[in-house]
Image (cartoon, rainbow, N blue to C red):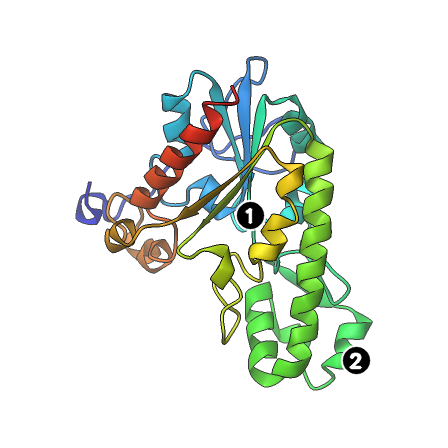
Amino acid sequence: MSYEKMSGTELNYEPCQYGESRLLFRGPKQELDAPFVAFLGGTETYGKFVPRPFVNALDEALPINCVNFGYVNAGIDAFLAEPSVLHNAQQSDVTVVQVMGAQNMSNRYYKVHPRRNDRFIGASNMMQMVFNEIDFSEFHFTRHMLGTLCARAPDRYAMVRDELRMAWSARMKLLLNTIGGKIVLLWVADHAPETAMGTSGLGPDPLFVDRLMIEELRTMVDDVVEVVVSKQAQAKGIEGMQCTDMERVAAQRMLNAAAHQEVADALEKSLSTMI
């Protein structure tokens, strides 16, 4: 299905809630009283602009319900702050946890919105002391703020990056320990974890996460599924994605429909041995 066939149409995500969670997840809403696989993650798991994200593809392929708890721009904090979601994950037969970037978490340097984790709330006193020439009131999003620090004070920015990496590792261990049971850790990106840090700028998504950080978690999970999106899938661009004309630029930065199928294929092999 080409972009031209879908141009100007807005995708209905059938937003729904589970239990007492305040987060709106992608529907259709699933029943949680039957065996199910829970999927926790960010924009990629949610499937922004993709009519058939990998969770839906797996729901069709596997003999068990697949419940999408993906949340757009989520960091680890979004799930740790939602007891209802954690409870649902604990009740699942298997939980798939996407590797999310380290930038969207509260830490010693700055605070993010408890649900919309990409929103920058404010800098700590320590942050303001270290970067006394920066006016933090001009920032609304974590990536914009970090990009500015990286460009204007790269040596001091490295301190913040290292803090985020340490916080990410600690927060991920807490999340995995809290969920328990069978867990699959999912890496999905256009590169392998070895190259995640990059050589200039902020680096590619998921921000600041590298191989060592993934390996530290391996003993806590039943499987690590790494999906490096193929060149063939990347070349398809927004083919098969559904967005309005104004959303086209944003869609070009998202995991596309072909990549979602590659993720589904990789996860199906892993999950079919656990359910």
Query: Residue 85, percent across and down?
Result: 65, 32
Which image quadrant: the N terminus? top left
- Residue shown at 57%/18% (left/top)? 32
- Residue shown at 58%/30% (left/top)? 95
Query: Residue 250, percent across and down?
Result: 38, 57
Identify the residue under disc 2.
129
Query: Residue 245, percent across and down?
Result: 28, 55
Identify the residue under disc 1.
99
The answer to which of 272 and 118 lies nearer the viewer is 272
Q: Left or right: 258 with respect to 225? A: left
- Is label 1 in contact with label 2 (beta carbons under 8 Å)? no
Mark 1 Cα shell of 10 Å, populated few (<14), some (14-19), many (≥20): many
- In this view, the residue farthest toward the right is 125
Q: Is residue 46 above or below residue 247?
A: above
Where on the picture, by quarter, is residue 40?
Answer: top right
Viewer-side label of 1, 2: 1
Q: Amino acid at mark 2?
A: Met
Under circle 1, the secondary element is loop
- In this view, the residue farthest toward the top is 34
Query: Residue 131, percent across and down?
Result: 72, 81
Q: Left or right: 137 with respect to 234? A: right
Q: Is residue 133 above or below residue 82?
A: below
